[in-house]
Amino acid sequence: MTDSAAGQQTGPTLSSRRALLGLGVLGAALAARSGIASATGLSDDDLATAELVVGAEMAAAGLYTAALEAGADPVLFGTLRDQHRGFADRVSGLGGVRARGGAAAWADARRDAFAADPATAGLDLENSLAATHAQLVASIESPAFADVTAAIAAMESRHAVALALAAGRSDDLDAMFTNPAAPLAEEA
Amino acid sequence: MTRSPITRRELIRNGTLTLSLGAILAACGAGRSGTTAPGRLGVAPPKATLPDATLDDAVRLRTAQSLEHTLLDMYAALADTGAWSSGATAWLHRFVEDHTRHSAELAELITAAGGEAFACANPFIADRALKPALAALDGSDDPHRDVLNIATAFESLAGATYQALVGQLETPALRGAAMGIGGEEQRHAAALASLVTPEHMVDPTLTGGEEHADPNGFPVRFVIPARFGQLTGIELVVGAPDDEGARTAVTLETPSDNAFVYASQSC
C-alpha cells in the first residue's frame, strides 16, 4: 500500500520535470533561432556590437597606458586612459560582455605613434572612436545601449579637442573642429 | 387620532394640475433646435482651438535646426559687443560657418522626413534663455568673460541636444547624422571651455582632486568635464551683480515639449 502510494506520487513529478525540460529546450532553440533579447536585455546583434565597443575602449586605454609609460603628461593622458576604461566598464556592464580580440590589430599599429607623439596619435584615435560610435548608434537596437554610445561619442569629441590643444594645434581649425576619420570597423 | 395635512381630494387636484402644466410646457418645447451646450454669460470671445501637435522625427529635426539658428543669432549679437577676443575671432567665424552648414544639412533631413525646414531661432529658447543672457551684457563688469560663458553654455546645449536626439529619433539612420553634428557642437564647446578655464583642461574631480569652484560663483567649464556626455541642465551666469550681489542666471535645458518646433509653427 505504501509502495503503491509512493508510485502514484512519483508519476506526476517525473512528467512535470520532463515537461519543464522540454519547454526549456524549446525556449532555448527559439531564442537561438530568432536572435531575440538575451538575459542582458541586448539582442544578439547588440551583444556583438557591445563586444566590439568594449574591445576598442580597452585597446584605447592600453594605448594611453603606453603613452604614460613613455612619459606623457599624467593628468591629461591618465584621465584619457581612465575615461576609456570607464566606457568599457559601462558597456561591459550593460551587455555582460567581454572584449572581442579583433581590436588588437589596429591598436598594435598605433602603439609606436603613441610612444613618439601621444597627442597627435591620441587625436587620431579619438577621431576614429568618435566616428565609430556615431556610426554605431544608427544600428544599435537597445535604447539604453544607444544612449550610452551617444554619451561616449560626445565625450570622445571633447577628448579630440583636448589633444589638439595639447599638440599645440589651436590655430588648426580643421584639427580642432572637424572629424576626418573613418569608423574603426571600416579601417580594420 | 391625528388629521393628515393633505386630504385625498387635495392630492388628486394638485396632481392633476401638475401633470397639466407639465404637458403644456413639454408641448411648448417641442421642435427646438440649436446647441445643447450649457449657456454662457457675457460676451467673451470663443476659446481658441489648439492646433494638432504631433511629435515626430521631422519636428525633432526642425527643433534642432531652430537651435542652430539660435546660436547663429547668438554669435551675431556677441560679435556686435566687441568683447570677443581677437585671438578667438577665427574660431567665431568657423563656428558660424559650421552652424550654417548644420542648418542646411538638417533642412535636407527634414524634407526627407516629410517636414518643412525651420530656418529661424527657437522661439521658446530665444525668449527664455538667449534674450535674458544677452540683456545681462548691458553694464557687465567683464564683457569678455560673459561672451565666452554665453557661447560655451549654448554650444554645450547644442551638443547635449543632439546626444538626447539619439534616444528620441524613431528612424535609426537619423541618429548617426545627429551624432555627426553633435560631435562638432561638442568640439566648439570644449574649445570655448579652454578659454573660460585655461588653467584646467580636465575637471579635477575626474582625477580624484577637489572641485574647482569660481570665487564669484560662475559655473566652471572644462574641456573634459565628465566621464560621459551630460544631459543635465546647463547653468549660465552673466553680467554684473545687482544691489543684492546676484547676477542674471539662466538654466539651459535640452528641448522638450514646449521647446519643440511643431509642424504648425512657422518662422
Image (cartoon, coloured by chain):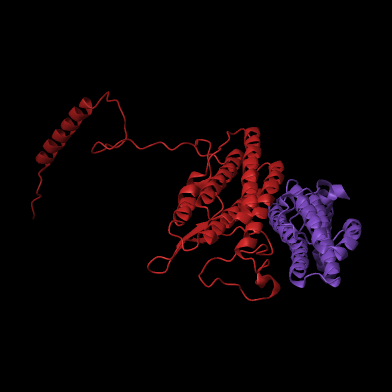
Chain colours: A purple, B red
Residue at 10%, 46% in the rendered image: B6
Position above or below: B101 against A45 = above
Seen in the image, is B71 located left or right of residue B124?
right
Residue A127 in picture, x, y percent from top left: 77, 53
Position above or below: A5 against B114 = below
Residue A67 in picture, x, y percent from top left: 84, 67
Seen in the image, is B81 located left or right of residue A185?
left
Residue A15 visible within the image: no
Residue at 68%, 63% in the rendered image: B224
Count of labels in the image: 0
User: Which residue is at the front of the view, B38 or B187?
Assistant: B187
Instruction: Give the farthest residue toward the front.
Output: B86
Residue at 76%, 65% in the rendered image: A80
Quarter location, residue A123? bottom right
Instruction: Give the farthest residue toward the top.
Output: B31
User: Which residue is at the front of the view, B203 or A33?
Assistant: B203
Seen in the image, is A145 located left or right of residue B234?
right
Residue B26 visible within the image: yes
Residue A105 in picture, x, y percent from top left: 91, 57
User: Where, quadrant-wise, is the N terminus of chain B in this rendering?
Assistant: bottom left
Residue B155 in picture, x, y percent from top left: 60, 53
Residue at 46%, 56% in the rendered image: B137
Quarter location, residue A9? bottom right
Position above or below: A73 against B188 = below
